[in-house]
Image (cartoon, helix red, strand yellow):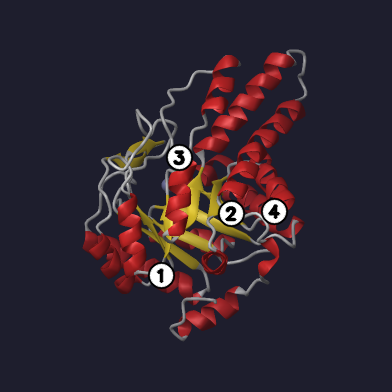
Amino acid sequence: MLVTMRQLLDEAAVGGYGVAAFNVNNLEQIQGIMEAAQETQSPVIVQASRGARSYAGDNFLYHMMLAAAETYPDIPVALHQDHGNSPETCISAIELGFTSVMMDGSLGEDAKTPLDFEDNVAVTKKVVDIAHARGVTVEGELGTLGGMEDGVGSGEICLTDPAQAEEFVERTGVDALAVAIGTSHGAYKFSREPDGDILAMEIIEDIHRRLPDTHIVMHGSSSVPKDIVERLKAAGGEVDAGFGVPIHAIQRGIEHGVRKVNIDTDGRLAITAFMREHYRDNPDDWDPRGAGKAARAGQKHICLQRMQELGMAGHAGDYTAMSLEDMAARYAQGVRSTV
Ligand code: G3H
Ligand code: 13P
Ligand code: ZN
């Protein structure tokens, strides 16, 4: 069942849980996510980066994502553009049929150079006007993550200022706000188990107090599981992996308004570990479906865990989908929340 991210996150706020947004690039990732969502009865966000769209091709990727919603009519699925770098990227996602877009105006169009506050407000507001007229949800970002992922990111961490966040949401009308609290994309986030000096959870608490109706998004939220990293290495792989975001930190965020939790790296690591084990244990398998099944199982393995840990499990049947037209009509009346 295709839903907007606004409705999916509004319902998560009512239920007091977080929703994982899993990045997808191919069929096996989408199937792994959906098998886990079906088994745990979880609503889910399936998201595509610009890199994913260019890897798979817009038409292939969109139709595989749409097939997820069509194949599982009882599971709410939002189709989301991750880290849109310009209004053009977001508009093309809306035209494809995504029900949600992220305008990441924390960085310029090169997805590297930090943008100043006024420019971020202007570019995000432009996308909100276009998206809301079509009923599509918008996520903005204030502050910058650390690290670089395939050229995405400035490499500099600039934590979100809660007072600025309040002004940003008022001026742009975004539905969800990605905040920078010290995390980075990728497998190497921290050199030690992150504590309060590294992860600024109090920023989330402050923003939630100021903006109780805006859904907070945590990027760079992979936990980089030690067991998966060890399996990947034992099967012949190499990865420079540090500490990830502990599940208890995500759960604390959820208690304070985090509703969307972005997870890409954990799926990538598990897929690679499972595929390497498959080839190690079956050197004579030259049918790519064997490795494809392993990839699907790797993605599913992570999703099953996160769906339980974030509290999404069991909430798929809580609501029916509002149409994009309904959403557009509500936005036109100045209503953001669906509950
Ligand atoms: O933006 C970060 C996500 O992990 C997507 O990564 O740009 O390599 O697809 P990507
Ligand atoms: P990870 O690299 O921690 O999985 O973060 C993913 C993300 O934030 C995608 O936007
Ligand atoms: Zn991200």
**Can you tell which quarter of the image residue 277 is in?**
top right
Q: Quick check: is the Cβ at mark 3 less than 8 Å away from ligand 2? A: no
Q: Which residue is mark 1?
A: 128
Q: Do the numbered discs 4 and 1 sit on residues whose CB atoms are within 8 Å?
A: no
Mark closer to the chain start, 2 or 1: 1
Mark closer to the chain start, 3 or 1: 1
Q: Which mark is residue 246?
A: 3
Which amino acid type is shown beneath numbered disc 4?
Ala
Q: Which mark is residue 68?
A: 4
Which amino acid type is shown beneath numbered disc 2?
Gly
Rounded to the nearest whole Å, what is the CA distance between mark 3 and mark 2? 15 Å
- Eye-nearest disc, 4 or 2: 2
Q: Which residue is mark 2?
A: 311
Q: Nearer the viewer, residue 251 or 5?
A: 251
Which amino acid type is shown beneath numbered disc 3?
Pro
| Numbered disc 3: secondary structure | loop
Residue at 58 percent of width and 73 percent of height: 324
Which amino acid type is shown beneath numbered disc 1?
Val
Q: Do the numbered discs 3 and 4 sit on residues whose CB atoms are within 8 Å?
A: no
Question: Relative to 33, is 210 on the left or the right?
Answer: left
**Can you tell which quarter of the image residue 339 is in?**
bottom right
The picture places residue 138, in percent across and down from the top left corner, at 45, 65
Mark closer to the chain start, 4 or 1: 4
Q: Quick check: is the Cβ at mark 1 less than 8 Å away from ligand 3? A: no
Question: Relative to 63, is 193 on the left or the right?
Answer: left
